[in-house]
Image: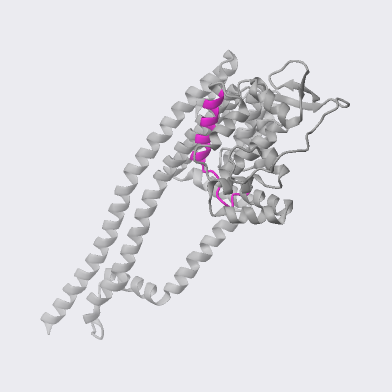
């Protein structure tokens, strides 16, 4: 038996434990409900191993990641083989080619080549893990329990990776960081704060709620822009079809006759001629403009200019600002409530704003807060945040109830954003329909005036 010295993640001094090996020691601690912050073997303790045992099989769903590693398997191969998925063949090939191939397969899973979790799946995963931990399950059994509920091979590989890192003495936050997507810096810092405070289940639940609310906000923005955009595209296609195919056939009797057409008819004829003769140039110009837009947006200066124009647009500018402020308020309240320092929380929240103009403003706020100022003053000086939010932040700083007040403000801002989304989705479609009716009416007027002109000419003859 070997002797191991460990310290509890929740605090306390160093303690000792006897076990055959490190993995057994970790399993023993997890069975007791202890999450070790460190686990080291005491040198000279005389550990012994039996040297006997059988290699685990790929289909064995109960084998640990450490055992799989000893057998030369990757977590990706274990997950894909257990699920009998198409990725199993590639994983088995990696097993046959050795450790290098196995590591390559795991890197593919990490990069999302075989499918990563979406935002809704991430929120569901974090919520399930929080529920398991709050029910009293230790961390590793909780992760293993989640792996049994219909996960994809990529998600099983992720869970096995998390289990392996925690079994080796690492923290859950570090395991999430080494995996990568879908765990961003915000989620990792919340997990780290939960582990440091001993409230990992509670803070994971707050993280899941934060991700779910962010997802709901994204869907609201999508619904506000997608339907009007589809209607606008269909209206443009309808106008092009009417002016380029229907109008020319109606005006064909006027060809070769010495009749002066009214100006609306000439406008429609000119537009139809341009579309029919130069459609390739228009299509190429649209593609070039779209490519130029993405190239400009990829540069810091171009992104800043585009986002500034976006904020100044009627209706949509206010919606973008409200959505960013709601996300900022909710995220900041969650981070501060989790126990992160205010300056760290502000810097993490800055990355969630999306709009470059607002991110630059938040960077300035962070610099002023680091210099000793309060949050409310720099926020007000940016001119981008509502006065009500500034007053709430100021009150929260003075009363010491900043997290609770930020949560209430976030709920109010999210309600305001949803209201604005409803207004936009209610107003824009009728505006587009009226615009389309005006264009169609102009085309019909051009045709009727031409027909009347033709009738007058025939009467004079």
At horizontal 61% and vertical 53% (from top left) the residue drawn is 298
- Name the residue nearer the viewer: 138 or 95: 95
At horizontal 60% and vertical 37% (from top left) the residue drawn is 62
Q: Answer left or right for 114 relative to 227.
A: right
Q: Residue 375 occupies which quadrant of the picture?
A: top right
Main secondary structure of the magenta stretch: helix
Residue 29 in sight in this render: yes
Give the magenta part as a residue range. Answer: 111-133
- The quadrant of the rendering that contains the N terminus is top right
- Name the residue nearer the viewer: 248 or 192: 192
Q: Is residue 130 magenta?
A: yes
Q: Answer left or right for 195 relative to 447.
A: right
Q: Residue 363 occupies which quadrant of the picture?
A: top right
Q: Answer left or right for 274 relative to 356.
A: left
Q: Is residue 242 magenta?
A: no
Query: In the rendering, at what x and y percent does residue 163 appear?
Result: 65, 35
């Amino acid at each position: 038996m070997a002797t191991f010295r460990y310290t509890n993640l929740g605090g306390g001094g160093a303690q000792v434990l006897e076990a055959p090996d490190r993995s057994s020691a970790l399993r023993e601690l997890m069975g007791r409900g202890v999450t070790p912050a460190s686990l080291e073997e005491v040198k000279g303790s005389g550990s012994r191993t039996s040297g006997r045992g059988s290699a685990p099989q790929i289909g064995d769903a109960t084998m640990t990641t450490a055992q799989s590693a000893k057998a030369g398997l990757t977590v990706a191969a274990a997950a894909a083989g257990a699920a009998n998925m198409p990725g199993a063949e590639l994983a088995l090939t990696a097993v046959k080619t050795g450790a290098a191939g196995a590591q390559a397969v795991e890197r593919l899973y990490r990069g999302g080549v075989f499918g990563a979790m979406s935002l809704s799946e991430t929120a569901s995963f974090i919520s399930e893990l929080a529920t398991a931990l709050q029910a009293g399950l230790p961390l590793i059994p909780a992760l293993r329990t989640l792996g049994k509920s219909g996960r994809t091979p990529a998600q099983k590989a992720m869970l096995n990776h998390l289990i392996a890192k925690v079994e080796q003495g690492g923290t859950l936050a570090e395991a999430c960081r080494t995996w990568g997507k879908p765990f961003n810096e915000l989620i990792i810092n919340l997990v780290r704060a939960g582990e440091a405070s001993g409230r990992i289940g509670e803070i994971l639940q707050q993280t899941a709620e934060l991700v779910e609310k962010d997802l709901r906000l994204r869907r609201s923005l999508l619904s506000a822009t997608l339907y009007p955009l589809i209607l606008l595209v269909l209206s443009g296609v309808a106008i092009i079809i009417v002016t380029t195919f229907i109008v020319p056939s109606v005006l064909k009797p006027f060809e070769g006759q010495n009749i002066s057409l009214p100006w609306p008819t000439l406008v429609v004829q000119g537009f139809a001629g341009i579309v029919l003769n130069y459609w390739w140039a228009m299509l190429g110009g649209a593609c070039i403009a779209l490519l130029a837009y993405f190239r400009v947006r990829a540069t810091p200066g171009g992104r800043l200019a585009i986002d500034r124009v976006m904020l100044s647009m009627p209706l949509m500018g206010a919606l973008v600002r409200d959505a960013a402020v709601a996300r900022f308020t909710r995220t900041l309240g969650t981070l501060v409530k989790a126990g992160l320092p205010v300056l760290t929380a502000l810097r993490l929240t800055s990355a969630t704003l999306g709009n470059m103009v607002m991110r630059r403003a938040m960077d300035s706020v962070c610099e002023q807060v680091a210099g000793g100022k309060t949050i409310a003053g720099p926020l007000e000086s940016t001119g981008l945040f509502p006065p009500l939010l500034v007053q709430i932040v100021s009150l929260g700083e003075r009363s010491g109830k900043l997290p609770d007040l930020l949560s209430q403000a976030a709920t109010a801002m999210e309600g305001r954003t949803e209201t604005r989304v409803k207004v936009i989705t209610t107003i824009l479609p009728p505006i587009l329909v009226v615009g389309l009716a005006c264009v169609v009416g102009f085309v019909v007027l051009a045709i009727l005036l031409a027909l009347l002109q033709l009738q007058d000419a025939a009467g004079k003859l």
